[in-house]
Image (cartoon, rainbow, N blue to C red):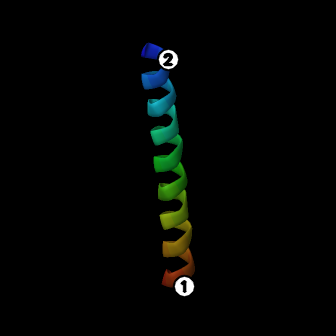
């Protein structure tokens, strides 16, 4: 269970970083 939780947390963290990066890129693209 501990491993599963860890994997889930890592997955969520990676997803959040990817989404935040995508939003940042979109903002920079639309703001110009």
Please determine whether, in this image, residue 27 is positioned above or below residue 2: below
Q: What element carries label 2?
A: helix
| Most distant residue in the front direction | 1
Q: Which residue is drawn at 43% across and 14% down?
A: 2
- What is the quadrant of residue 9 in the picture? top left
Q: Where is residue 23 in the image (x, y as percent from the top left)?
A: 48, 66
Q: What element carries label 1?
A: loop
Q: Nearer the viewer, residue 31 or 8?
A: 8
Residue 32 circle label: 1
Residue 13 circle label: none
Q: Which residue is drawn at 51% across and 48% down?
A: 15
Q: Earlier in the sequence, mark 1 or mark 2?
A: 2
- Say few, some or many: other residues with alpha carbon within 10 Å of mark 2 (under 14 / 14 to 19 / 20 or more): few
Please determine whether, in this image, residue 4 is positioned above or below residue 26: above
Quadrant (top left, top right, bottom left, bottom right) of the C terminus: bottom right
Q: Which residue is drawn at 56% across and 68% down?
A: 25
Disc 1 vs disc 2: which is toward the camera?
Answer: 2
Separation of disc 1 and disc 2 at Cα? 44 Å
Quadrant (top left, top right, bottom left, bottom right) of the N terminus: top left
Q: Position of residue 8 (x, y in %)?
A: 46, 32
Q: Which of 13 and 24 is in front in this view?
A: 13
| Most distant residue in the top direction | 2
* Residue on which disc 2 sits: 3
Dots 1 and 2: beta carbons under 8 Å? no
Q: Where is residue 22 in the image (x, y as percent from the top left)?
A: 54, 63
Please determine whether, in this image, residue 21 is positioned above or below residue 28: above
Please determine whether, in this image, residue 25 is positioned above or below residue 11: below
Q: Nearer the viewer, residue 19 or 1?
A: 1
């Amino acid at each position: 269970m501990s491993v599963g939780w860890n994997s889930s947390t890592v997955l969520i963290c990676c997803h959040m970083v990817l989404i935040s990066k995508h939003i940042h890129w979109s903002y920079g693209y639309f703001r110009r």
